[in-house]
Image (tube, rainbow, N blue to C red):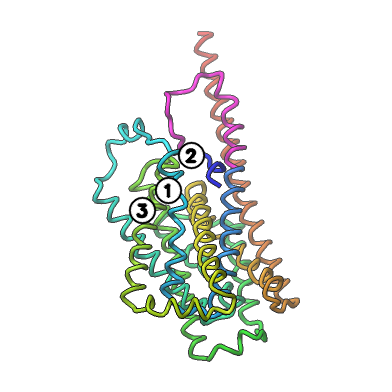
Amino acid sequence: MFSMFLPLVLPGNEVKESGEPDAGHQSTRPQIKGQIWWIKMGIYSFFVLSGQAVATLLGRLYFDKGGNSKWMSAFVQLAGFPLLLPFYCTLLPKNSTTDSIDTDRPPALTFAFLYVSLGILLAGMCLLYSYGMSNLTVFTFSLILASQLGFNALFSFFHNAQKFTFFITSSLVLLIISSALLVFQPDDSSDSKKISKGKYIIGFLCTLFASSGYALMLSLTQFAFKKIIKRNTMRALMDLIIYQSIMATCLALAMLFASGDWKVLKMEMEEYELGKVSYLMTLIWIAAGWDVFNIGAVGLIFEVSSLFSNVISTLGLPIVPVLAVVFFHDKMDGVKVVAMLLAIWGFVSFMYQHYLDDSKFKAERENATQVFQASTSEEVQI
């Protein structure tokens, strides 16, 4: 997995490691960078969609087969970050040259406050997520999470000056309608009979708050990259993932013991319907799934924006019910199919807007190059 990572560079704000390129390389570099950028986009999008689907389905499996600890569920959502440590410690460059140039970077205490704040927010979001997962069916849970797109649009407007065009707005509307169709669709699955009205309300509110918290964290992450971190490197991205994950994991582990949940874990494992080994493997793969999702989400923030990252994750929400039909034999009707098609339509609409923006940027760059070349030739003739 680690060999698939490529150096992160924001379009139009490339990191310079060895001075300005010569004229012979300038004609080929934009095309190469464009191809690498789309490859990275595909990799990060795959990480988001696959990690989210696997972790969500296994999270449901944990509660369905006898798991009950909310803090354990929150802990495993965060505990997968050590898988990144070998890559982080041995393969990433230190970027000493870049660091020495950035004399206007904030002090270390500012970075510590940033990582601690995001870690606390992440731990709280995972706990709310666990309460929602345990009290709702996978259909309802997945679709309430789609509200994070609306929250993220609001936060991005205030924090990151996100511009809304016709295609972006239509994408948001289509994705929200897609979720609303499934929310209002009666759920006659066997799981819904196990959930009381009170637990349903608790699960609904917790999932809604988790959705808004995740959207807030995405916007704050994008804001932090622009205003605080100020380094367009893979090292900066991995610093953010590692340090906020350490904080969130330590908090979740501490609360696991403080709440007393650790006392019943042995009995929970023994009574797990699929056996002790399956109990451990379920928790391990939940951790790995969310770790992959986290890498993809932060990578998309770094490459594009928090809104785009949220669009990709929202696209995956209709995929989870489809996989639930395959693996958990949940029912799938015409309304759910229409909702999934609307979600795909919304995603395509957003991608088309990004294609228009990219084409406009390339045209402006070519015009600027032509003007520069024309002025240079006139100076030579004079």
**Label number found at residue 223:** none
- Whether residue 146 can be seen here: no
Q: Amino acid at mark 3?
A: Tyr
Residue sitting at x 74%, y 78%:
333
Q: Where in the figure is residue 317, as x and y percent of width and height?
A: 60, 67
Dot 2, how many residues are within 10 Å of its Cα: few (below 14), some (14-19), or many (20+)? Answer: some
Q: Where in the figure is residue 28, as x and y percent of width and height?
A: 60, 26
What secondary structure is found at the residue carrying circle 1? helix
**Label number found at residue 9:** 2
Which of the 4 image quarters holds residue 336? bottom right
Between disc 2 and disc 1, the foreground one is: 1
Quick check: is 272 in the magenta stretch? no
- Whether residue 357 can be seen here: yes
Q: Mark 3 — residue? A: 243
Residue sitting at x 54%, y 29%:
368
**Residues in magenta, as a range:** 12-38
